[in-house]
Structure formats: C-alpha cells, structure tokens
Amino acid sequence: MISVSYLKSIYNKKDTIKKIDESIADMIHVDLMDGLYVENKNFTIDEVIDDLKDTIKPLDIHLMVNNPEIYIDELAKLKPFAITFHLDSTNKKDDVINQIKDYNIKVGIAINPDENISILDGYLELIDYVLVMSVVPGKGGQPFIKDVLDKIKQLENKNILIGIDGGINSESITYLKNYKIDNIISGSFVCMSDDYNMKIGELKERA
Ligand code: DX5
Ligand code: ZN
C-alpha cells in the first residue's frame, strides 16, 4: 500500500486532501503534531475532524503528540483504519492501546530512528501495526535514513503490519525492494508536485 501524507504540499490543505482522496493512493496518512512531542504544531483536533470527515479513502493516523489518550475519542469519529502513537509520548500506554482497540481500529506504535525494536517488548502482542520512522518525526521533506531497514528485517517474522514513514521518493523506495512492508508513506515527493497520480504511480512501479 502507498499512503500519502499531506504535511507539505504546494496546494492548500483542503485541496491537497481532496487531490490525495481522488488519487490512486491507497490511504491518506494523517500527521498530527502538537508542538510538544515535536517542535512543530500543525492542526487542532477540530480541524482534523473537519478536514477529513467527508474523505473516502482509509485514514492512517499518526499521532506525534503528548498524551495521545486525549485525542482518541474524537479521532474515532473518523473511523480510521489505524491510529499510531509513540510510546514515549504517554505514561498511559496500555490505556491508549485499549482505547483504540475498543473502537475496532488497528493500533500502531511508531519507532523513532534512535529507538530499537526492543521498546516493543510486551506490546507487540497487543498491537496490529508498527510504523518504522525513517526520519526524525516533526516535519516533511527530510532525507531517508537507510539504517532503519535493519528494524524492518527484525520485524518481518512477527506477524504484524509494518509501515515505513519519511523520506520516501522514487529513489529511496527502491531500497525497500527486499523487505516485507505493508504500508509505505510518502509526503512531499507526491504533494510537492502537480501530478499526484504520476508520482504515486512511480512509487508503485518501483516498490
Ligand atoms: C514526519 C511525518 C511523515 C512525513 C512524510 O514527521 O510523520 O509522515 O510527513 O513526509 P516526507 O515523505 O516528506 O518525509
Ligand atoms: Zn507520519
């Protein structure tokens, strides 16, 4: 699957979301940043709900916020495919997992480039999805960190969905060829162009 993040685009947010929704992308990747867990702040929860309430494609929500537990009930209204959070963003990790599960939404944990998959010990059995960050979370348009591919190898036999997020373009996607990855997220490579389908098509061809 190719999911597209609308964090960085040449179009305004509404138009970008519409263009992704009408494209050949498989999912819309929703990055939410609060200016606390990461330096940048982008949207309020009300904006996210309003922006995405009428979209058709499945939503892959990525929370880069402190205390993700306070966002889940609202986000569940969008009936997303998955909600992913960072373990170090909350001390209510089990509550967050259960809260998401109770809505029948897939639960994801994101691993930062400087984190090892051992942080998932005790959680892997409880979740559906691991999002391996191939950039430091916080902004779009950063270069792909190749070292994180080792973590994909370590996760491949764990019977869990695997995503990779950050720095994916027509070149870096070729590095993923021999890996089992369910969800490849690309942002600026697609949204900084005026032909989303051409860019997504290029990714699909080269994956
Ligand atoms: C990074 C975000 C990514 C990012 C992807 O903080 O989680 O989803 O927007 O965008 P590109 O492809 O530009 O790295
Ligand atoms: Zn993301």
Image: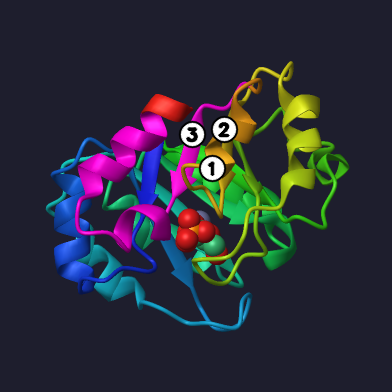
* In the displayed structure image, the side of residue 53 where residue 138 appears, left or right: right
Image quadrant containing the N terminus: top left
Q: Indicate the amino acid at tag 2.
A: Thr
* In the displayed structure image, the side of residue 6 where residue 89 appears, left or right: right
Q: Residue at x 36, y 49 (%)?
A: 4
Q: Residue at x 27, y 53 (%)?
A: 77
Front-most of residues 20 and 76: 20
For residue 30, above or below residue 82: below
Q: Does the numbered disc 2 mark a residue whose Cβ is under 8 Å from ligand 1?
A: no
Task: Identify the colour scheme used.
Answer: rainbow
Front-most of residues 147 and 181: 147
Where does label 2 land, which residue?
A: 174
- Mark 2 to mark 1 CA distance (whole Å): 6 Å
Q: Indicate the amino acid at tag 1.
A: Glu
Tell me if label 1 and label 3 are in contact, CB under 8 Å. Answer: no
Where does label 3 land, which residue?
A: 183
For residue 75, above or below residue 10: above
- Mark 1 to mark 3 CA distance (whole Å): 17 Å
Q: Residue at x 67, y 32 (%)?
A: 126
Q: Indicate the amino acid at tag 3.
A: Asn
Stretch of the chain drawn in magenta:
180-204
Q: Does the numbered disc 1 mark a residue whose Cβ is under 8 Å from ligand 1?
A: no
Q: Residue at x 38, y 69 (%)?
A: 8
Where does label 1 land, which residue?
A: 171
Tell me if label 2 and label 3 are in contact, CB under 8 Å. Answer: no
